[in-house]
Amino acid sequence: MEKKPLNITVLGSGTSTGVPTLGCRCPVCRSHDPRNRRTRCSLVLSRAGRNILVDTATDLRQQALREDLNHVDAVLFTHAHADHVNGIDDLRAYNLQGGAPIPIYGHADTITVIQRVFGYIFDDELEPGYRPRLEPHVVSGPFDCCGLPVQPVPLHHGGSLSLGYRIGPFAYLTDCNGIPESSRSLLANLDTVIVDGLRFRPHTTHFNIPQAVEAMRELQVRRIILTHLSHEVDHERHSQALPAGVELAYDGLRLEFSI
Ligand SMILES: [Zn+2]
Ligand SMILES: [Zn+2]
Ligand SMILES: [Zn+2]
């Protein structure tokens, strides 16, 4: 395969409530630092004119406007928690450009929940213009997505499962608090990881920042970028205290690889 640039843009770096959190008057929620304004967690991978979304976050429409995302070719779903799927109806606008249904990929459990919760989308009796046209694909191993080799990586997310996705030297591991032993070999020789690092205090379903750093260090990741950040994390203040090679994501952060 000929190498081409893979551009990655963080659409959202915030936890499920977003930051600022509604009704909160804490210093981070009242901060004027744009890096403390975090929409719900999502990412877009762009290569050779194709755009692959990771999740359809609650804030998808605003994220797409901000990043001038003018078409979507596929969606990889990490799991079916509300903050990661609730923007799914906004895919309808991209369907209006014509073309085939947008393929969506995820673990069997995730696809099942999406089909149940958003039943109208998959109800062929309904008028097509009022629902996104999507083509579900269950994934359980490596697959090709718009010419990119994608490796799903099962992760512990409390008592449930989420999928991370690895593309070449990069992996996106949001919403997790443990790496199953069987997934470790899928994460060898990584350069850069964007990983769940909710806050400093422990949490039952998310890595906190020290846990995320430790887990990524065990995998010998060179560059560790923390995401799914809560309002307990102040970008400027806490960035200064992070160890070398560890940084905080922010909405609009861009990375580039050659794949
Ligand atoms: Zn989440
Ligand atoms: Zn707050
Ligand atoms: Zn989640």
Image (spheres, grey):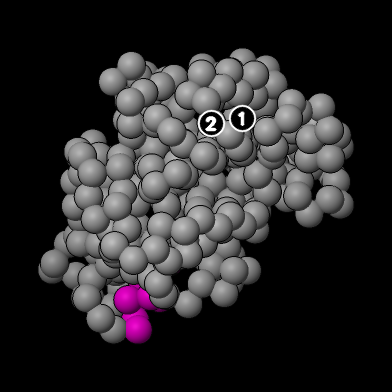
Quarter occupied by the N terminus: bottom left
Report if the CB atoms under discs 2 and 1 are less than 8 Å apart: no
Disc 1 CB within 8 Å of nearest ligand 1 atom: no
Which residue is at the front of the view, 239 or 191?
Answer: 191
Q: Answer above or below: position of 213 versus 41.
A: above
Location of residue 198 (image quadrant): top right
Side of 107 where 153 appears, left or right: right
Disc on res. 221 = 2
Q: Which of marks 2 and 1 is nearer the N terminus?
A: 1
Q: Mark 1 points at which residue?
A: 198
Residue at horizontal 40 percent and vertical 72 percent from the top: 48
**Residue 178 pos. (x, y %):** 44, 20
Q: What stretch is highlighted in magenta?
A: 88-97
Q: Nearer the viewer, mark 2 or mark 1?
A: 2
Please say whether residue 15 is one of the residues in the magenta stretch.
Answer: no
**Given the current orientation, which residue lies at the most extreme front position?**
2
**Residue 87 pos. (x, y %):** 45, 57
Give the main secondary structure, helix, strand or loop, of the magenta stretch. helix
What type is the residue that disc 1 sits on?
Answer: Leu
